[in-house]
Structure formats: C-alpha cells, structure tokens
Image: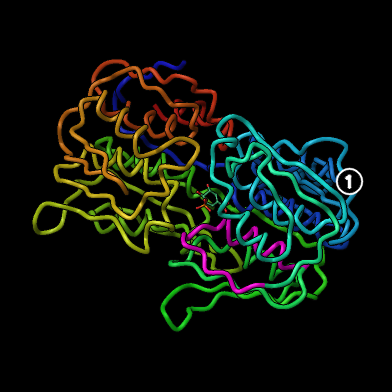
Amino acid sequence: MIALEKAKGPLKGDIFVPGDKSISHRSIMFGALAEGTTEVTGFLQSADCLSTIDCFRKLGVEIEHSLRPTNGVPTITVHGRGLRNFKAPDSTLYTGNSGTTTRLMSGILAAQPFNSMITGDNSIEKRPMKRIMTPLSQMGAEVISVMGNDCAPLSFTGGKTLRGINYRSPVASAQVKSCVMLAGLYAEGDTVVYEPALSRNHTEIMLSAFGADIHNEVARDGSAAAILHPGMPLIGQKVNVPGDISSAAYFIAAALIVPGSELLIRNVGINNTRSGILAVLQQMGADITLLNVDETSEPKADILVKYSELHGADNNQFVIGGKVIPTMIDELPVVAVVAATAGFDTIIKDAAELRIKESNRIDTVVEGLTKMGCDVEATDDGMIIHGGKPLHGADINSHADHRLAMSFAVASLVADGTTRILDDECVGISYPSFFKDFQSLL
Ligand code: S3P
C-alpha cells in the first residue's frame, strides 16, 4: 500500500516515460519469428514484457540484455529462429498478467508442429479467449480452453495446416487482429481482419518493417481492414521503442489538473491509433502542444502540457464515444479522473471493452471515484461523471490493476487528505518506476 498526499504546488519538469508496452512485446515476438538478429532499444523492462521474453526463451529463442558497446544504451538482442524453427516447450507457457502475450502468442502456437499450453495469472484466467479461439479454429487450428470456460489455460494441438481467412471481428481489438495476423503468417492464402474501428496498428507497421506484406485499408462499408499476403521472409531489424503514451497519460492528466503545472514529456509515441487522449483532452480545452514531431515509422513527439481550465460542449456536457474509444481505451480510467475534476458532465460510451480488461474498469473506476467523493454512475458501456465535486482522500482498491493504481495516484494530487492505494506494486506490470517518477515531481 502507498499513501499519497495532495500536491502542495504546481508540477514542473522535463521527463521521459518508459518504452511503449505494445511495441516492446511485438519487438520480441517479431524478432523471434524473423531470420537473423533484432536489436531493440527503449524496450520496456516491465513484468508484462518480461513474460513475453520468458515465453520465447521456452521456445528456444536466445534473447540477451546488454549495453551497446559504443554508447552504453541498454539493448535487447533477439536471435531469431525464423517462422518454423521453434523448439517444443518443456512446460506450460506462463504469461503472467499479460493479455497481449497470451493472445498474440496463441496465434503463433496454433501454427506450430508441436503441442503446447499457455496460461497466466488469476486475471488472465478470467479474460475472454473465445475472441481468438473462434478465428483460429476457422483457420484450421485446434485450440481448446482446458477448463471449458473459453478462458486460459489454452491447449494447442500441433501439426495443423492453417488456411487464411476473412474474419470480421465484432470488436476493435489489436490483440485479436494481431493474433489472427500472426497465425496468418503460417497460413495458405491471404488473411484479412475487419474490425468496426481501427485498433492500434503496431503489428501492421512493425511486421511490414520486418518484410511482411501487410497493410491497413478502409473497407467499403467503413470498417477497418488489415490485409496480409503471407510468404515474404521476415528479416531481423533494429527497433527503437518510443515512450508509451499510456504511461505519459498519467503525467498529462496530472499537469492538467494541478494549478500552475507545466510538464514536458519527451519522445512519446503518438501513432494516431493510440493518441485519442490528446485529441479528446484538447477538445476539452487542454493546453497540449506537440514539439519535435518525428513521423518516421512509429510517429513520436515531445508533449508539452500545461494546467488548463477544461470546458464541456455547449450544454455543459462532453461525450467520449465511437471510433475514438479504441484509440484511448487504456487511458479512459485516467481521463475519468480528469473529468471528475472538471466543472461539467462527461459521458463515456461505447467502451464496454473496459469491463474485460485487467479489472472490470467500469466498476473499479466508479468504485474508486465514488470513494473519493465524485458523483459518478456506471453504465453498460461506460460511465457518466458529474465533474466538479471536491475530491477527498480515500482507501482505493487497485484490484491489482496497474492502470487503476496510476490513475488514482493522479487523483490524489487534488484530493484533500491522504489517498491510500492498495496493491500499488501492480504498477510493475507496465511502469515499474512509476511512483518514483511521480513523487519526484511533487
Ligand atoms: C493491446 C491492445 C489493447 C490494449 C492492451 C494492449 C496490444 O487490448 O488494451 O493494453 O498491445 O495489442 P485489446 O486488443 O483487447 O483492445
């Protein structure tokens, strides 16, 4: 448990946040699938990404951590085995708390010549896996949920020949899309995944840089398509991981709500499938400026954010919904905290996916904000936050959800009294040094 007090003054600073979690996972995975070596800098050393490294080591992939001899930059070197040279694992692959590891690895395991099993912690064993089992089965894979509840542990039968599919995913999910694309690398024929709105496209960008023939298109009915023609060899690359906008989000929110604050957050990934939080907060009147924008490969920029008086739309309401939701799905808890401090109502809708994240983030956010004195109600697909009531410290259950722990740390900055966050060590999932970095600004 960590005890946090209200900020005594403005937050000022020039900071970096750790590497992007989604891109870090993919750098290891695609490096492992490629021929030759992949060198990764800026890799996120957090529990989730280390789970991905562990799983690939169990498949016989050599992965080294070292310092670059020339400039001492920490580097991960992945010695790729190519698509078809993994070794059968001796035991069940364990993915910890990582949904990305579980779902993306499943696409790879489904296509191997050997049998395998994958599972993770208690949270992972409750998260829905039917969303990947359905398309993988349509491709000819044999995957079963061992407990028969459509959750992990999942067991894969080796030696299946996969065929490409046209798959209409009912949800905009990069984990589903990427799982199917990875299986598609092994399939006969093309694979196309349609999703109702474009989810993060790091897989498409990075696989293409490794040599795969893969791209995004807008389909005729307006849905987003990812299209893969398999058969191109994957070749190891140098990957430089930008800072994670999902981690930067806590500092953006903190600067916006603590009067007089000004923070510069350097080298943050601003891929437009991830940066919905910036657009939404700017529409609310947030003073956020992008500096040194670099559009090559994964776009990145320095983000300058200043304390701002936020405003709703004409009727003193602000609605967040529709296609922007997948581009800020992991930031919605901290956006709810910002909304709680603003003098208008915020309606978050079309975000039922929040219910099946590391915790049920509709219920857990509403629970925590209510405890702090906010007037907030849960809806089926989001929440309605009647902002502007003063917040007070409270004992907050993070439900071992890293994004909850960090979001309520931000809320503590404007809450009278002490805020205690239970299971605060869960921040190690995505941002191990979060509380050190956060408290260094106070
Ligand atoms: C991720 C995709 C998103 C996101 C998760 C990381 C990824 O999940 O919430 O934190 O790296 O592909 P969904 O695909 O379930 O939306």
User: Farthest residue in the left direction?
Assistant: 315
Q: Is residue 238 left or right of residue 120?
A: right
| Residue at 83%, 44% in the rendered image | 63
In the image, residue 304 lies at what x, y percent? 39, 51
Within-10-Å neighbours for mark 1: few <14, some 14–19, many 20+: some
| Residue at 30%, 22% in the rendered image | 6
Query: Between 399 and 193, which is closer to the camera in this rendering?
Result: 193
Q: Tell me the magenta residue range.
A: 165-186
Look at the image and say whether residue 180 sits in the magenta stretch: yes
Which quadrant of the rendered structure holds the C terminus?
top left
Name the residue that disc number 1 marks.
88
In the image, residue 211 lies at what x, y percent? 75, 72
Q: How is the image coloured?
A: rainbow
Q: Is residue 194 above or below residue 392?
A: below
Q: Is residue 56 left or right of residue 260?
A: right
> What is the quadrant of residue 221 in the picture?
bottom left
Label 1 is placed on what type of residue? Ala
Q: Is residue 190 left or right of residue 275?
A: right
Query: Between 157 and 66, which is closer to the camera in this rendering?
Result: 157
